[in-house]
Each structure stands twice: as C-alpha cells, then as structure tokens.
Amino acid sequence: MRVLTAPNTQDPRDGGFVATLPGELLYRPFVCASGQDGRCGCERSLAGMTTRKGTTLAEVTDKDMTLADYIDAHASFLVDVWGWDRAGAEDEARALADVASDFPAGTLVTVQLQDEAHVFDALEA
C-alpha cells in the first residue's frame, strides 16, 4: 500500500527542512499557536514516528503492509506516545492513508495548514 514516509532528499524550497530518517512513517504533529499564524514550521510539516522530528517534505512510498497493519502501527504510535484515544488515532491513520493513495508512488508531497485543515500537494518541479 502507499504511505507517506520521510524522503531520502532535502526539501529544495526556501525554508524547507528534513530532519527525519529516510523511509520512516510520518504523522501529522500538533500545530502550536505559533504555527497557526506561520511563525513556526509545524503548520507546514509532518513528523517521523521513529525520530519524532519534522519534515516539510514527504514521499509516497509503496510499503509491504496491509491497511490494517498500517492503521495499527500508526494508531498505536499516537496512543502510546501522544495519548490519543484509539478511535481518533485510527481515523487519523485512515486519513493519511487516503492522502497517500491520492498520489503515485515516488511523488514528493508538501503539506500546509489552510483554514484549519491540512492540504497536501505534489512538490512542483
């Protein structure tokens, strides 16, 4: 299945950053008050489940896992590390799986908080 992972490249855009390990699964971190008004990178980044560090660029990757495996891994991380309730964590996992399914494998994807919703787009070449 296609999932969002940390890329094996740096973000070429001004202000872009990749502090994650290539290939690690990504999640949407909490957006702080500074991020709400653009003073922080959290409004335009994802974070790695292994490093818990941020990246402004994701790669759509084909992983040898089922949707159930992905939901379990993603939801377990959110519950164990961040204290999410299981149902909400599973919904979040499904939402990111849906995002990844919208792009071909190998696509570099950006994220931006707009009107309290994350918008995902393919990186412009």
Image: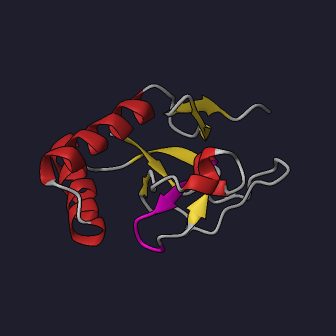
- Range drawn in magenta: 44-51
Q: Quadrant of residue 109?
A: top right
- Tell whether 44 sits left or right of 79: right
Tell me where residue 73 appears, x and y as whole percent. Answer: 23, 58
Tell me where residue 2 appears, x and y as whole percent. Answer: 39, 39
Q: Quadrant of residue 94?
A: top left
Quadrant where the C terminus lies? top right
Q: Give the tally of numbered discs.
A: 0
- Above or below for 92 versus 75: above
Q: Residue at x 57, y 67 (%)?
A: 20
Q: Residue at x 61, y 38 (%)?
A: 112
Q: Quadrant of residue 93?
A: top left
Q: Residue furthest right?
A: 14
Q: Residue at x 44, y 50 (%)?
A: 28
Residue 35 is one of the magenta-drawn residues: no
Residue 93 visible to an observer of this rendering? yes
Q: Residue furthest top?
A: 102
- Tell whether 118 sits left or right of 108: left
